[in-house]
Image (cartoon, rainbow, N blue to C red):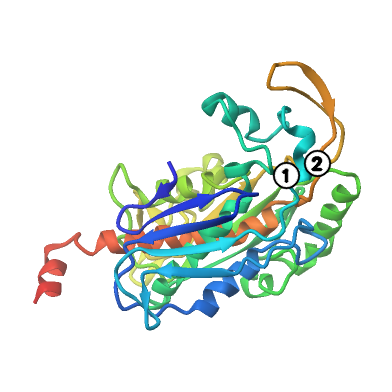
Amino acid sequence: MNSFGMKLRYSTFGESHGKAIGCVLDGVPAGLEIDEAYIQSELDRRKPGKSEFETARKEADKVEILSGVFEGKSTGTPIAMVIFNTNQKSKDYTNIKDVFRPGHADFTYFHKYGIRDYRGGGRSSARETAARVAAGAIAKLMLKELHIEVLSGISEVAGISAKTYDYEKAKSSLIYALDSSVEEAQKAAILEAKNNHDSVGGVSRVVIKGAPAGLGQPLYYKLDGVLADAMMGLNAVKAVEIGDGIQASRELGSANNDAIRANGFESNHAGGILGGISNGEDIVLNVYFKPTPSIFQEQHTVTTTNEEVDFSLKGRHDPCVAVRGTVVCEALAALVIADMLLLNMGSQMSGVVQYYK
């Protein structure tokens, strides 16, 4: 599947070393002001080649809107956007034409389809996520109309964890670090791995502020389930926590329950979601990224004919994919919340009557 969402549905297309990548976003209500400069600024946050902590591949990631916008506003029809690839070095991948890279989707794509685009992984490359960021930027414009904000940052790199979470500070950090007290240690860990031709993992912390209570569908389209689905569909993500996540399994019920008073909840261990439905508190997620599988050490693998070989990778790759990944997490969270807002409009008959009056 290359599509996600129900009322607000996006589909992406393209490959890492193809002519272009892009998306089609369907379900955006008519009349939304489409700020193209803002969409581009979101892509600029994710684009590669900005610092030594990222891949050296430099792409402008210039987005072009092809349809669904007239005189600066959405028309209610599908919004198509395209981003042309301009800095491919496909020759870097000729040595893996018949070789499966450990940790990558090469092996599984080949066994599923019987063919694979070996140039940077083709469709399985994280390059595709730029299209999700473009779609997510429009979702963020929708959320802005309702004073809902999605923020994120890196809370952990190579096991070095933040003690505080400053989302404003993260915006100006080269690695989107949430805690200044550990940022330099996190940077050093990334560079050490890079210098050793290796990579490190990391954790993105995402918070959604201002979402109303009532978002999410019972049982089979729960808010936490869909958020986890969206995040797990992102390259290199291996785990997602809502609220306290794993820690909640180690607590007593008396400690984990969020007591309620007349003015709201006394705590937020649940991460803003109860029974799969938002409760009005901040929605909090932790998204865990594995180390980038593209490393420059000799590795053992097999060929497409199952011959055992040793090989060394070439190319340009992120030493910590979580850094740029956190921007994509924001986009995905925004798309899910916007979808849930549209779904929730018909939950009560009074709302339907009010709209049609």
Q: Are marks 1 and 2 in contact (CB under 8 Å)?
A: yes
Name the image quarter holding residue 66. bottom left
Q: Amino acid at mark 2?
A: Ile
Tell me: residue 165, above or below residue 107.
below
Residue occupying image coordinates x 56% and y 25%: 114
Q: Based on the displayed image, in which of its 4 quarters is residue 78 positioned?
A: bottom left
What amino acid type should be assigned to the residue bearing mark 1?
A: Thr
- The image's mark for residue 295 is 2
x and y, in percent, of residue 271 in the image? 47, 56
**Which numbered marker is on residue 292?**
1
- Residue at 47% over, 79% down: 35
Q: Nearer the viewer, residue 37 or 202?
A: 37
Q: Residues within 10 Å of mark 2 (few under 14, many from 20)?
A: many
Vertical placement of 306 versus 112: above or below? above
> Is residue 41 depicted above or below 201 in this figure?
below
Q: Residue at x 49, y 51 (%)?
A: 13
Secondary-structure class at tag 2: loop
Q: Nearer the viewer, residue 256 or 290?
A: 290
